[in-house]
Amino acid sequence: MAFNGVNISVEAPIENQIQEITYEGVEIYQPPLTLSESLAKYAQKIDFSKTIEADVKKEDVTDENKSDSDSKDAFQSSLWPWDSVRNKLRNAFQEISVLADVLAIAKDKRYMVLDPVPQEPLETKPMVQIYARKKALAGAANVLLAGAEKLKTSQNEAARNRTTPDFHIELLRLRQNWRLKKVSNTIIGDLSYRTAGSKYLQTGTFEVTKAEEDEKLCSPPGSPGGAPPNKPSSALKVSIPSELQGVAYIEVLCQKDQEDLCSASINLLGSGAPSSNPDMHWQQKLEAAQNVLFCKELFNQLAKEAVELQAPIPHMVVGNQIMATVLPGIQLIIALRHSTSAEKKQEKPSPSKSEHDHVLEHSLHQLLREVHHKNTHHPFPHPATGPLGPSKKRMMAGPMAADRYELLEMTKQEKLLEQIVKQAQHFIMRMRTEYVLDTIAKEFKDPLISSHWNTLNSPTQSCVKINISTHGYDAVCRTPLVIHVGEKSLKCICRDGKVMNMSYEPQELRDLIFCHINQHQILAVQALAKTMGWQCLGNSNHLGSGPVEPLGNAASCLLVSPTGDRIIAVRCEPQASGLQVAVAHSPRTDFIPTRLVLERKWEHLGGQFRDVRLDKMEGKNFLHKMELLMASLTSNS
Amino acid sequence: MGVTILAQFPVENKTGPQIIEVLSKRICALGATPQGQFLVDCETFTSVPALGHQRTVHVLHNSEQPATVFALLETGTKTIPLVTDGLFDLLIMKMISFYQSKKHTKTESKGPRFEIGDFSVKLGTVNITSNFKGILVEVEYKPCVVPAMCWDLIMEFMQGFLGSSGPTAPPAFLQNRMQEIYSPIDTIQQYLEHFTIFRKSTGPTMVMRPQQP
């Protein structure tokens, strides 16, 4: 107040305190105190012992200068929440100071002396104590001994019988092949195909438990008595829901008027059909259950599609059986067979049906797997913002500006049932074609008919190559044919490149082959004539003369000998053994002048044809006979 | 997909439904069968001034290509066409802070659709924010993809039912693309051309015949 000139302001520094300086020289400041923190900090600085004096002083001071009062009031009001703390601290301080005074007085030993208060000693009997300790020790020893005994026996057991299954090892093995999870105290497994892309609703959960001890002990003694195969008993027990127990398979039958054409049965486990014994190994048990689940899903899917599909002849779903018409008069029957008990196993259709078709068996299986695969494997790329799932074609539809018809086409996709029906159709077509070719080959010996089936084919298309040739004259003439066997039709590509489309009726193919045999004979005779030095005067594949043929047209050719004096006429009808051969001489070797024909030169105009009786001739087959005939006629001149 | 020609039909003091009815009767008399409805719509967005030089984006949909969104970006010097997936609409919604929708420019052409042999005919009523503006007739010849090869045929066909108001020369957009392979975006370009003319005009009465030799 005395020096008015200079004002000094005292305030806290703007910079915070440095807490730490790191090695690279960065200074870490302390965070600034919050309002409550700074209040607490200030409260720490208050000397409570002086508050009484301060109060007294304050009263004086308030009287003295009013100017400071507002700041004091602020101080008091800010201290107000701390009042109880202050009071308690003050009381504690009072007590401590009294104690300090007492101690100070006692320390002097002049006015006060501290004496210990004597206590009564506890009466203990040594014998009772010893007994009690002995008893306690004996109890502890018993526990330890029992434990040691258990360990010793288990070790002995393990040493004696190393194959004793261990629950945890088994569990580990189970875990390697199956999905398991722990739900509270139980272990739950999942055998559904959901992780593989299945969308079937039925759950395939099973529970894993530890096999009972006595059960485990019971099975080894059973082995010497009943002498069953020494099956390793398992420490694991799996319990499967009742609807998945037993054996299931899908039976595929192609029926024609209640007569089986072929049958196939799907059994994922192959030939060794597992019995539903309770003492089966868990691996087999789980596989069987999974098989049941798969068959159920497959059948469910097929039944759903059979109802949905609008076939010209509606599919029928009755109980566990689907009936679909493949070709007129031929039905495809798909049935789900599920036997839950061991006795029913005997009722299985006897394996007398020799035509066990592995292709149809496999296809059904494959088709559902394919659906599963498609569900999990989406075509690339997977856009971050686009929807996942539509086909690649659909994804390109937007940028390629596909119109409504194209988009509509994309939504259609073949159902499982349609695919299997197509495969069955193809199967029957193939069988019919095979049958027709084989019977014709059996019937005909003269031109030989050989057929080669392509080993590589698709489930709905296959191809057969047919060669028509004559034994001994393969090099002279050969008629090749290729037949594509489709789902409901046949396509034949002929020697001359013509394409013939035929329906599923086997008679059509039969007729076609007959026509080609006929054609082959005529062509072969001509080719043979060329090698013999004979000349072909003319030929016609579709002869207009003669009686009307029931099938196709007759073919003919006219051959003349090198010297030109002999003519052979061959007529071939598509009917079996419809070969006619006639011979004419010009001029005739013997000339007898008549009233009509006076001179020999007129005989050059051509003579009468005389039939050759082929069946009386020498020769293995038609071409051989013709060769002999030509040879004899040539040498004669 | 074939070649599409778009032509304007003069209104001449008639209402839109009246003209559509007259044309429908004419095309049905030729033996066409009705095949539902069609719709082509166009919305225009302009870039905000903050992006610098102003650009315009026209977003069009055609019911013939339901999975596709067409966009035409006009930079002032050239037009960049874009054919995309339906998700482009969502993208445009996200870009609303850069490209703002022009007010009162939502244009659409809709009406009946007919099939007659290899042709498909669409009679569209053009509305700009539900105000009637005019009539657009679209004719598509499906078996051909090169405009030059089928222009005469289409012209003759159009004159057959539009009378003298049918087009006599190819649309301006196709003039220099007559030998190229036609694609759906070309149809959209033609629509945009006509929509732009309609937007500039004030009402249906102002619409004159497009080409008159």
Image (cartoon, rainbow, N blue to C red):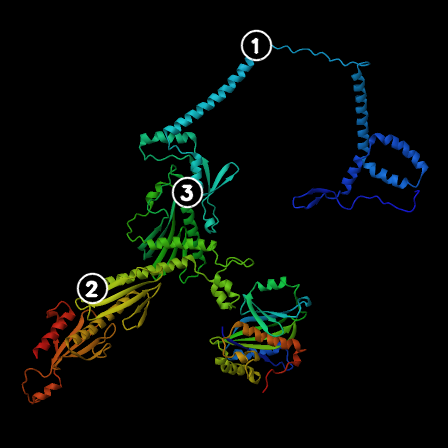
The residue type indicated by label 2 comes to Glu
Residue drawn at x 6%, y 88% is: A594
Q: Earlier in the sequence, mark 1 or mark 3?
A: 1
Residue B26: quarter of image: bottom right
What residue is shown with label 2?
Answer: A443
Q: Earlier in the sequence, mark 1 or mark 2?
A: 1
Neighbour tally class for label 1: few under 14, some 14-19, many 20 plus, Cα within 10 Å:
few
Q: Do the residues at pointers 1 and 3 share their chain?
A: yes
What residue is shown with label 3?
Answer: A286
Q: Secondary structure at mark 3?
A: helix
Residue B1 visible, this orientation = yes
Does residue A567 appear to the left or right of A7 in the view shown?
left
Does residue A216 appear to the left or right of B183 in the view shown?
left
Q: Secondary structure at mark 1?
A: helix
Q: Do the residues at pointers 1 and 2 share their chain?
A: yes
Q: Is residue A337 above or below residue A98?
A: below
Residue A94: quarter of image: top right
> Toward the viewer: A442 or B149?
B149
Q: Position of residue A349 (x, y in %)?
A: 32, 48
**Depth-wise, is mark 1 or mark 3 nearer the camera?**
1
Q: Position of residue A403 (x, y in %)?
A: 51, 69
Chain letter belonging to callout 1 = A
**Depth-wise, is mark 3 or mark 2 nearer the camera?**
3
What residue is shown with label 1?
Answer: A127
Residue A417: quarter of image: bottom left
> Toward the viewer: A113 or A201?
A113
* Residue that lies at the very extreme toward the right in this rendered image: A64
Neighbour tally class for label 3: few under 14, some 14-19, many 20 plus, Cα within 10 Å:
many
Chain letter belonging to callout 2 = A
Q: Is residue A260 above or below residue B180?
A: above
